[in-house]
Image: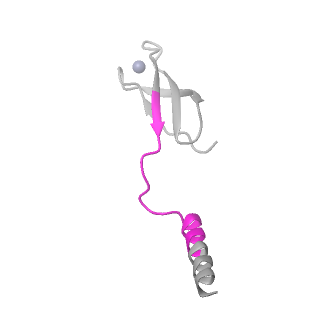
Amino acid sequence: MGRVIKHYCNVCKSEAQQLQIEGSGDYQKIHYACKNPECKHKFVMIRTFSHTTRESDLTRTQSVEAEAANLKQTEE
Ligand SMILES: [Zn+2]
């Protein structure tokens, strides 16, 4: 996995440790445990894909290729 995003307990504001991630892809439930020994709050955060703000160059290239293929077909 990549970098762990720091999360904080919403009760005592201490740093929380990431325990596990449920699911994969666009919808994940992330389990955390508060590192404060006097708190020990455990909680789940939900991370979901929201929306695209810039189109991927990968899909852009594909659509350009698809357009080129379409043009070829109409020319023939
Ligand atoms: Zn806490």
Q: Which residue is drawn at 50% across and 39% down?
A: 5
The quarter of the picture showing ligand 1: top left
In the picture, measured across the screen, residue 24 lies left or right of residue 49, that is: right
Above or below: residue 9 compared with residue 48: above
Tell me which corner region of the image, top left, top right, bottom left or bottom right, holds residue 25: top right
How many numbered circles are shown?
A: 0
Q: Nearer the viewer, residue 62 or 3?
A: 62
Q: What x and y, as percent, mark residue 62?
A: 60, 69
The answer to whether residue 25 is above or below residue 45 is below
Colour mode of the rendering: one colour
* Quarter in which the C terminus is drawn: bottom right
Residue 59 lies, with reference to residue 6, above or below; the image says: below
Residue lying at 47% horizontally and 37% vertically, measured from the top left: 47
Q: Is residue 39 left or right of residue 23?
A: left
- What x and y, as percent, mark residue 42? 47, 18
Residue 46 is one of the magenta-drawn residues: yes
Q: Residue at x 58, y 71 (%)?
A: 61
Is 51 or 13 nearer to us in this picture?
51
**Which quarter shows the N terminus?**
top right
Taking depth in this image into account, of 48 and 21 the one nearest to the observer is 48
Image quadrant in which you'd find residue 11:
top left
Q: Is residue 39 left or right of residue 21?
A: left
Q: Where residue 34 appears, x then y in whole percent?
A: 47, 21
**Most distant residue in the bottom direction:** 75
Span highlighted in magenta in the image: 45-64
For the point 44% across and 62% down, which residue is it? 54
Q: Where is residue 33 in the image (x, y as percent from the top left)?
A: 50, 21
